[in-house]
Amino acid sequence: MKRIFDFVFSLIAIVVLSPLFLILGLVVKLSDGGSVLFIQKRTGRGGVPFNMYKFRSMSQSEPAAAGLFEPGNISRITPTGKFLRKTKLDELPQLFNVLIGDMSFVGPRPEVEKWVAVYPGKWRRILTVRPGITDKASIEFLNEEKILSESSDPENRYLNEILPRKLDLCVQYADDHSFTGDMRIMILTIKTILFR
């Protein structure tokens, strides 16, 4: 049922939002002449890697594209990117990930390989479900970038404070997820973005 919902509604959303895709793509392209999409390798269900898509919100960086983590680094965010990130419009291309089955609307956010290698016991359980565009951890850490940018050691804070909390929430989801629960998370995500 979940996969049918993901396929049908991602297809509808892509068709309905196609004019917005074109406008945002054009704005990103004109902002600095770089690529429209940011494509990064993430780890999916069963540990299978896949390419996750976003509208590019930062100046181009080969290390970032290769999956190296730059916690709290806001220096490369473009003016257009600030708007895209605040509204979460940069995540829209992930509808294509949902359509082809790499991701779901709701599920643990996919990580780069570096962080999947951390806390392997928890990740084994988390990777039994399909990653998603949003989850409880995404809502709780909506301002994660700001938190990390204000830290004197952002990578250490992510590793020892934020990531463990995220993984606890992801394990809870993997152990006790439901279609109605997914609907609640989607509604809460929209409310949080609009009224934060």
Image: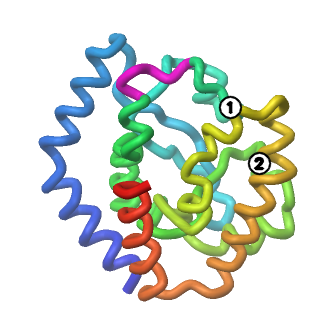
Task: Give the residue displayed 58% in from the left and 29% down from the top.
Answer: 65
Above-or-below relation of 186 to 68: below
The span picked out in magenta is 76-81
113 left or right, relative to 185: right
Q: Report the side of 173 relative to 34 (left or right).
A: right
Residue at 60% from the left image edge and 61% from the top image edge: 140
In the displayed image of the protein, which residue is found farthest to the top?
Answer: 33
Q: Nearer the viewer, residue 48 or 92?
A: 92
Badge 1: residue crowd in 10 Å (few <14, some 14–19, many ≥20): some
Coordinates of residue 22 in the picture (x, y in percent): 18, 35
- Looking at marks 2 and 1 on the same chain, the residue that comes earlier in the sequence is marked by 2
How many angstroms separate mark 2 from mark 1 (CA)?
A: 19 Å
Task: Tell me the element at label 1.
Answer: helix
Q: Quadrant of residue 2?
A: bottom left
| Membership of 61 in magenta stretch | no
Q: Quadrant of residue 74?
A: top right
Amino acid carrying mark 1 in the image? Ser
Asked if 57 appears above or below 148 in the picture, the reply is above
Point out residue 90 in the picture as x, y percentages from the top left corner.
Answer: 39, 40
- According to the picture, the residue beneath numbered tag 2 turns out to be 115
Looking at the image, which residue is at 28% across and 63% down? 10
In the structure shown, which secondary structural element does the residue marked by tag 2 occupy?
Answer: helix
The residue under label 1 is 149
Q: Is residue 11 left or right of residue 36?
A: left
Under mark 2, the amino acid is Trp
Q: Residue at x 82, y 43 (%)?
A: 157
